[in-house]
Each structure stands twice: as C-alpha cells, then as structure tokens.
Amino acid sequence: MKNLGNMLKQAQQMQARMQEMQAKLEAAEVEGSAGAGMVKITLTGKGDLRRVSIDPSLMTADDREVLEDLLIAAHADAKQKAEAAMAEEMKSATAGLSLPPGLKLPF
C-alpha cells in the first residue's frame, strides 16, 4: 500500500509539472529560417504558426517555386526546434520521477 501512495503522489506531481510545461510551451516561440534568413517562420512551442517573414526580393513570379520551397524548409526548421524545446521541457518535467523506461509522454 505504501507503494501505491507513492505512485499517486508522483502522478499528482507529474500532472502539475505537465500543466506548467504546457503553459510554457504555449508561451514559447521558436523561429525557423531558410535561404540564409530570407524566409523566417515563428511557431509556438506547441507548433501553432505565429509569424511569417519573407524578404521582398523573393516576391517575384520567377521566384515562386523557390519561395514555396523556402517556406517549407523554414517551417521544418521551426518545427524541429519546437520539438526539441518540448523534449527538453518534458525532460525537466519528469525529472526525479521514477518512470518505466521507454514511456513516452504526453500519452
């Protein structure tokens, strides 16, 4: 029974940490860029798009395909940074808790 009480206490601690982490991620912003910074995309830590910045020199009909590719690359860069931020927050949120190896959170 003592183990069960400890597990419940750990679960409550983790729930509080997860709520803090989610609030931090929602407030955090990461920027991805492509084309030597000519295209920049800003996402929240949860992956919501906040801003897109495009260098005016890319606004020509001839550069349409290049611009489309740069937007995709900048988004991928920002998404990777957001995922890294989430993994780091998850690591700190679960610090000190004895979780089974390989357990992926959030569920």
Image (cartoon, rainbow, N blue to C red):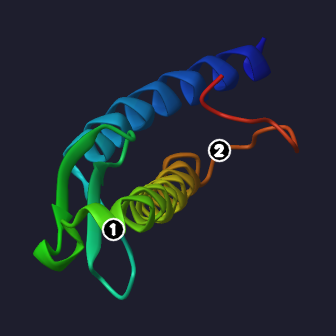
Front position in the image: 8 or 94: 94
User: Where is residue 37 shown, x and y percent of the image?
Assistant: 29, 82
Q: Which mark is residue 73?
A: none
Mark 2 Cα within 10 Å, few/some/many (few <14, many 20+)?
Answer: few
Front position in the image: 67 or 104: 67
> Does residue 25 lie above or below 56 as drawn?
above
Residue 39 in which image quadrant? bottom left
- Is 84 on the left or on the right of 30, as rendered? right
The amino acid pointed to by label 1 is Asp
- Is 96 on the left or on the right of 21, as rendered? right
Residue at image location 65% in from the left, 17% down from the top: 5
Which element is circle 1 on? helix
Front position in the image: 61 or 50: 61
Distance CA(mark 2)–CA(mark 1): 55 Å
Residue at image location 27% in from the left, 46% down from the top: 24
Mark 1 Cα within 10 Å, few/some/many (few <14, many 20+)?
Answer: few
Q: Is residue 28 visible?
A: yes
> Does residue 54 lie above or below 102 as drawn?
below
Residue at image location 54% in from the left, 60% down from the top: 80
Tell me the quarter of the image containing the C terminus.
top right
> Does residue 71 lie above or below 19 as drawn?
below
The amino acid pointed to by label 2 is Leu
User: Where is residue 23 shown, x and y percent of the image?
Assistant: 26, 37
Q: In the rendered image, which residue does mark 2 sit on?
A: 97
Residue 78 in which image quadrant? bottom left
Q: In the rendered image, which residue does mark 1 sit on?
A: 62
